[in-house]
Image: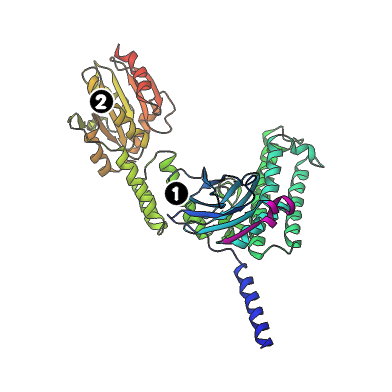
Amino acid sequence: MKKTIITALFALIWVTGQGQKHLPAFQYSKEPAVLDGIIIGDALQKPDSVRVRYALKYNSGMGDALRRGSTAVDADGHFCLNLPTGTTVDCYVTVGNCRFTCYVVPGQTVSFTLNLEKQKTQGLSKALTFSGQLADFNHDLVYATEQGFDPETVYRDIEAKRNMGQLAAELPEKSEEGYFHYLDSTYKRINELIDNDRKIGTAYRDFAKAVNRYELGAMMPFCGQSIQYEGIETEEAYDAFEARLKQRLDAYMQDAPWVSPVLSYVMWGMPETFVTSYVSRPVKLPADYQQCHLASKFLEQMGAQKLLLTEEQKDSVRTFLPVLGRDVLDYNDRMERELSFVSEQGMSRICTLPDSTKDSDDILSAILKPYRGRPVLLDLWETTCGPCRFAFKEMHEKKKELADRMHFVSVASENSDLATWQRLIPNYIGDHYRLTKQQLQTLHQQIPCDTNGVPVWVLINADGTIHHAFVGWGNLDQMMEELSPVLQ
């Protein structure tokens, strides 16, 4: 009997250890993450709410946007808060004067009990008990932060000193080598603290070392902004510095630190710094990270930049986002519907350039030739440009009012899908041209403003001369201010 009990205890210990061995897979879901729990304290000290701050990673099209949530604590100390995070994400939780970080999982519940009386006398990690998803990991995270070896906190302090101009004053050597020695020694010190504290589990240990490695790499490019050292007065000296920095980052990347799935938990966006600016070879990212990161970029394009997906991008979404692609395409369809409207005026027509002018170096004159005698508002747009299409919608009624006083001419290019262009233009008042990419490039060279981006607006006087050209859409009132001089 005694042998059986001992065997069972060893089995229980082994199972418990296995449960903490590795972080669970990085997750994404449409279902919100749930954070709930109990706050224990007397009536005088018990807070009436729990507040949470977190980054929206993969969700509504705004990329990595900061979100806040809060919920009331009831008379028994219970609370429950839904967080539409989209992915596994870290949350900054505030309960009264207590603040700590924990991770939540979409579609799953993370719970904690906080004893405020114990927190005052024994510290936060003794007062907090987690259950549900990531329970042991979250407790280790709070414990490590309290002990002062949470890598993210350490590097955040370094970043704050750098931004305030205090970092150089604390370095033993005000030099490039001194800066990198400082980073290297910080990296080694944090890893030693992590390894020497046996109270934390393997899952958090792996995570903390990944954060430490990641943050070290992220701090490397800031050397030139932090240290005022001699020898960087010339362009040649700066090029040499850039080459040395690139060598350091290449060495840093030798063992492909981004291949670890743990890094899916760590941060977003910064790998692009290494890939695009400094690293010679491609960086392999964890598959879960790639899925969420790519989806987030597409959604950011649509949400923040107001650019719809091209047909090629839609094909990429279907190919490379087998799980998340439907969400991305649905968001694009929703934006399409918001930008669509139906005109019953029959005031638009498709126009083509005469064959004799198609290869001309003066595309602008060829387009404007039929419109002499009245002012012209010429706009360059593309079907995937949200602001362009919003401008068509906003200006629709005003164009009807001004139809007998000026011409409206719109130019798209082969960059716009032909079928989409043909579907949209019956709703957009004016004459519509579709140019080749070469013709568009020639036209850009004739417009007296920076033509990077769309929409581009060109105001033409009645005699065919350019009055003004500008890029972007603000609102209808601003456009009418621009139009007023040529309508006099």
Q: Position of residue 318 (x, y in %)?
A: 37, 56
**Magenta stretch holds residue 124:** yes
User: Which residue lies under the disc numbered 1?
Assistant: 59
Q: Position of residue 333 (x, y in %)?
A: 32, 46
Query: Which mark is drawn over residue 397?
Result: 2
**Magenta stretch holds residue 317:** no
- Left or right: 19, with 461 as reference point: right
| Label 2 Cα neighbours within 10 Å, binned few <14 / some 14-19 / many ≥20 | few
Q: Which residues are magenta?
A: 117-131
Who comes first in sequence, dot 2 or dot 1?
Answer: 1
Q: Considering only vertical position in the picture, is 410 above or below 301?
A: above
Main SS of the magenta part reads helix
Image quadrant assignment for residue 10: bottom right
- Judged from the image, the secondary structure of the residue bearing numbered disc 1 is loop
| Amino acid under disc 1 | Asn
Q: Answer whether residue 150 is visible to the viewer in this image.
A: no
Q: Considering only vertical position in the picture, is 27 above or below 232?
A: below
At x 78%, y 44%, the residue is 178
Query: Which mark is drawn over residue 377?
Result: none
Q: Residue furthest right?
A: 172
- Left or right: 437, with 161 as reference point: left
State the separation of the CA atoms marked 2 and 1. 35 Å
Q: How many marks?
A: 2
- Quick one: quadrant of the N terminus? bottom right
The one nearer the camera, 4 or 88, is 4
- Quick one: quadrant of the C terminus? top left
Q: Position of residue 328 (x, y in %)?
A: 39, 50
